[in-house]
Structures are given as C-alpha cells and as structure tokens.
C-alpha cells in the first residue's frame, strides 16, 4: 500500500510539474515586447496630443491678450487743450481771423494812401484804430504763448501715462492704441505750434502795416501843410536894429 501511495504522489507531482512547465513554455516574449512597444507609442501619441492642446491654449491666451483694449483714452484731454487755443483765436479782437471780414477791415484801416478830401479827424481815428488793432494782436499772441505753456504741463502727464501703458501693454492692441494716442498728442502739439505762429505772424504783419499806413497819413499831412501855393522865399531879418 505504501508503494502504491508513493507512486500516486509521484504521479501527481509529475503532472503538476508538467503543467507548470507547459505554462512557462507558452509565454511569448516577442509578442510581449510588441505589446510594450505599441503601448509606448500610444502613450507618446497621448503625450503629443496633450502638448498640442497646451500649445493651442497658449495661442488662444495670446490672441486674447492681443485683443485686450487699452483702459485709457487721452482724446478728451487732448481735445480740451486744443480747444483752449482755438478759443483764444475765436475771441481775438480787432482784426479777426475771418478772411472776408479781415480783408474789409484791413482795406479800411490800412489804406495805400489818403485822399485830399479825407478829414483830419478821420485820419486820427484811423491811426487810433490801427494802434488798438496792433495792441490786441500782440495781446492775442501773448495769451497764446501763455496757454501753450500751460498746455505743456497737461501734455507731460499724458505722455507719462501713455508711455507707462505702452511699456506695460499685454498685447498688440494695447500697444497700438497707446502709440496712436501718442501720435495724436504730437499732432495736437503741431496744431498748437501752428496756431501760435499764426498769431505771432499776424501781430508782426499788423505792426508793419500800421507803420506803412502811418507813413501814408504823414505824407498827406505834409502835403497839406506845404500846400500847392508859391514856394516860400526867405527874407533877411533884422535883430536888435541891425
């Protein structure tokens, strides 16, 4: 019985050993390697897709920054400073800047010559009007200079803000808007400089015209003083009985 039992046990062990050996022999190394390679490739594709999504997200963020508007607009302030000099020109007294009106006033106050029928009172009145016109023109030019000096303080604040916004721009739109406002400031200053030059040239021209008109008036006064009669003939004069 012991021999039979030992034989049966040996048979069972052999059978188990044979089954384990059969399972070990079935494992396919090449197939396993291929599966690992396929899994690695799929993982790489997933990683590439994730990177692509990240790049697209970054691109969308950049596009959002480029479309972000600048939260500062200096146009109203620039128009206000420009309006200050425009108002001085509009309020200019004496010879206005209107072409038709100024031409009519100029022809009346600054004649090329005075006729013999012009009264002395009229010539004096015209001389006073010319003097007042020149003074008012100089006053307008002086006010323009003062206003331009005050506008410089406002321009400095605008430039400082625009440069700060331009340097801190998060996108192309903000940088472009800041640059456009800087160009608008330069244009406003150019217009102001032109207005100032116009007022100064106007004052100088009126002063020259006044001198010419005064010369024409003086010529008429001299002509009336001398008259058209016979020339004066000198005679000897005796002093103290000599």
Image (tube, grey):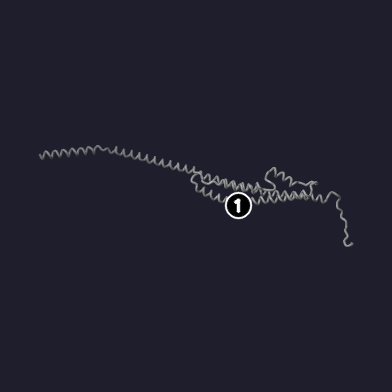
Quarter the N terminus occupies = top left
Label 1: element kind: helix
Expressed as whole percent of the image width and height from the top left, the position of residue 90 reads: 65, 46
Residue in the image at 53% along x and 44% along y: 177
Residue in the image at 33% along x and 39% along y: 39
**Residue 164, above or below 39:** below
Describe residue 1's horizontal placement relative to residue 208 as left or right: left
Describe residue 213's horizontal placement relative to residue 185 as left or right: right
Q: How many marks?
A: 1
Q: Residues within 10 Å of mark 1 (few under 14, many from 20)?
A: few
> Farthest residue toward the left?
1
Most foreground residue, 71 or 7: 71
Expressed as whole percent of the image width and height from the top left, the position of residue 190 reads: 61, 47
Expressed as whole percent of the image width and height from the top left, the position of residue 206 reads: 70, 49
Expressed as whole percent of the image width and height from the top left, the position of residue 94 reads: 70, 48
Describe residue 210's horizontal placement relative to residue 52 as left or right: right
Residue 99 lies in quadrant: top right
Residue of label 1: 150
Quarter the C terminus occupies = bottom right
Most foreground residue, 39 or 103: 103
Describe residue 122's horizontal placement relative to residue 23 as left or right: right
> Farthest residue toward the bottom?
240
């Amino acid at each position: 019985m012991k021999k039979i039992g030992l034989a049966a046990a040996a048979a069972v062990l052999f059978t188990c050993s044979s089954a384990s050996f059969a399972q070990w022999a079935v494992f396919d190394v090449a197939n396993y390697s291929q599966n690992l390679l396929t899994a690695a490739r799929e993982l790489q594709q997933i990683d590439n897709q994730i990177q692509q999504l990240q790049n697209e997200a970054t691109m969308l963020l950049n596009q959002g920054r480029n479309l972000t508007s600048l939260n500062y607009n200096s146009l109203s302030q620039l128009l206000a400073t420009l309006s200050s000099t425009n108002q001085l020109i509009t309020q200019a007294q004496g010879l206005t800047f209107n072409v038709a009106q100024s031409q009519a006033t100029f022809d009346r106050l600054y004649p090329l010559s005075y006729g013999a029928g012009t009264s002395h009172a009229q010539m004096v009145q015209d001389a006073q009007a010319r003097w007042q016109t020149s003074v008012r023109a100089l006053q307008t030019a002086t006010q323009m200079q003062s206003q331009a000096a005050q506008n410089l303080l406002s321009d400095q604040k605008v430039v400082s803000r625009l440069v700060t916004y331009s340097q801190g721009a998060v996108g192309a739109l903000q940088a472009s808007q800041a640059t456009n406002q800087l160009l608008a400031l330069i244009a406003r200053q150019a217009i102001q400089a032109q207005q100032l030059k116009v007022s100064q040239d106007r004052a100088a021209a009126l002063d020259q015209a006044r001198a010419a008109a005064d010369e024409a008036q003086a010529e008429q006064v001299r002509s009336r003083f001398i008259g058209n009669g016979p020339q004066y003939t000198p005679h000897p004069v005796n002093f103290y009985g000599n």
